[in-house]
Amino acid sequence: MFISIQLMALRSKLEHFLSSTVKYTMFRSEKTHDVRSASHAGSWYTDDGDELASELSGWLENVQGTDPPYPIAGCKAVIAPHAGYSYSGPAAAWAYKSIDITGIKRVFILGPSHHLYLDGCALSNCKEFATPVENLPLDLETISELRDTGKFESLDIDADEAEHSLEMHLPYVRTIFQGMDISIVPIMVGAISTQSEITYGQLLAPYLAREDTFCVVSSDFCHWGVRFSYTFYYKEPKPDNQPGINLSRSIAPSDSHPIHESISRLDHEAMDILTLPSSSASKVHTEFARYLTRTKNTICGRHPIGVLLGALATLEETQGIQPTIKWVRYEQSSACRTVRDSSVSYASAWIKF
C-alpha cells in the first residue's frame, strides 16, 4: 500500500513536470500558422460581425465634446483597456476616436501576458489575425526584422490564442482604419525589468518614429479586491505623504472615504505621473516604476506602458521630440464599498509626438 502511494505521488510529480515543460517550451515554437482565430469572440465580445460593427460605431459616436477636438493631428499612439467589451468598450472608444489615420500603414500592438510567464517579449507565428468584422494581416517583414535581433521569443498558436490583451484591440483597429491597407505587429510583453523596458523601447523607437506607423498599448488599470489579492486603500481623500493600508475583514474603510474613491485616487496618481510634457519621458518612466514599487497597483499593462516610455525617451534623446500624453477617460467596472467587492479600472489616453 505504501509503495503504491509512493508510485502514485511520483507519477503525479512526473505528469506535472511534463505538463510544465510542454507549457514552457510551447511558446517557443517556430511552427507557422496562417490565421490566429478570434478565440474570445462569442464570450468577451460578440462574434456577429454586423452586431460588433454597430457596437463599435455606437461607442465611437458617443465620444463628444473633446478638448482639443478629435481626431488629434499627429497622434502616434494610444493607451486603451482590454476587458470584455461590455465593460471597457465604451472607455476604449475615447482613445480610438483620437487617432489621426492619415498615412498609417502599420500598427504595433503591445499587450501584457496574462497566462504565460515571459521574461522578455514574444512575436506571433501567424500570418493573419481574424476578427468578426474583418481580418488583419501581420507585417511579416517587420516581424522578421524584430526576430532577427534575437530579443524576441516565438509564440505557439495555443499560447497566442489564449491571450486576450492583444485580441481585444483588433476589432477597434480594423474599424478605425476601415478600408485602409494596414498590417499589424502584435507583441506580447512579459514581466520584464525597467531596464528591459528601456531596451525594448530602444528597439522599437525607429519604427514608431516613422510617419506611417502607429502604436496601441493595451492596459487595464487597478484590479481591486480579494480575488485579485489587492486591497490597497487610502484612508484620506488626498493621500499626500500618507501611506496606504491593506483592507481586510478586520480593517474596514472609512465611512467618509469609499473604497472606489480611493481606487480612483490611486489610479489618477499613475495617470498624473504618466502625463507629458510634465517632464521628460525618461524621468516619467523612473517615477512610474517607483510608484508601482510603492503602491503595487495592479496595472496589468505596466510593462507595455514601460516599453512605450522607453521608446519615447529614446526619441527624445535621438530626435529631439517632445511627446504629449493626455488622459481622456477613466471608468470603473463597479463602485467598491466593502472588502467583499471587486472592480477593474479602465483608462484611455492619446500620445502625440
Image: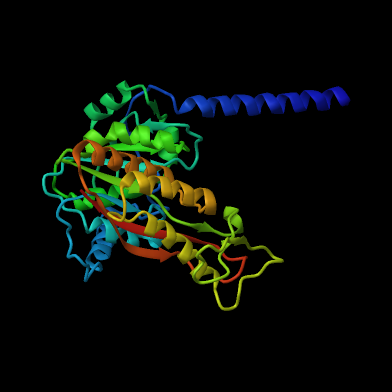
Q: Quadrant of residue 67?
A: bottom left
At x 14%, y 55%, the residue is 73
At x 58%, y 55%, the residue is 230
**Looking at the picture, how far across and down is residue 262, in whole percent?**
51, 67
Q: Is residue 7 left or right of residue 89?
A: right
Q: Is residue 266 visible?
A: yes
Q: Quadrant of the N terminus?
A: top right
**Looking at the picture, how far across and down is residue 200, in whole percent?**
35, 33
Q: Quadrant of residue 3?
A: top right
At x 37%, y 36%, the residue is 198
Q: Is residue 101 left or right of residue 153?
A: left
**Looking at the picture, how far across and down is residue 183, in whole percent?**
21, 38
Above or below residue 271? Residue 213 is above
Q: Is residue 110 left or right of residue 334?
A: left
At x 39%, y 37%, the residue is 197
Asked whether 16 or 287 is in front, the reply is 287
Above or below residue 108? Residue 173 is below
Above or below residue 272? Residue 31 is above
- Furthest residue to the right? 1
Asked whether 275 or 126 is in front, the reply is 275
Asked whether 209 or 158 is in front, the reply is 209
**Looking at the picture, how far across and down is residue 189, in whole percent?**
40, 38
- Furthest residue to the bottom? 256
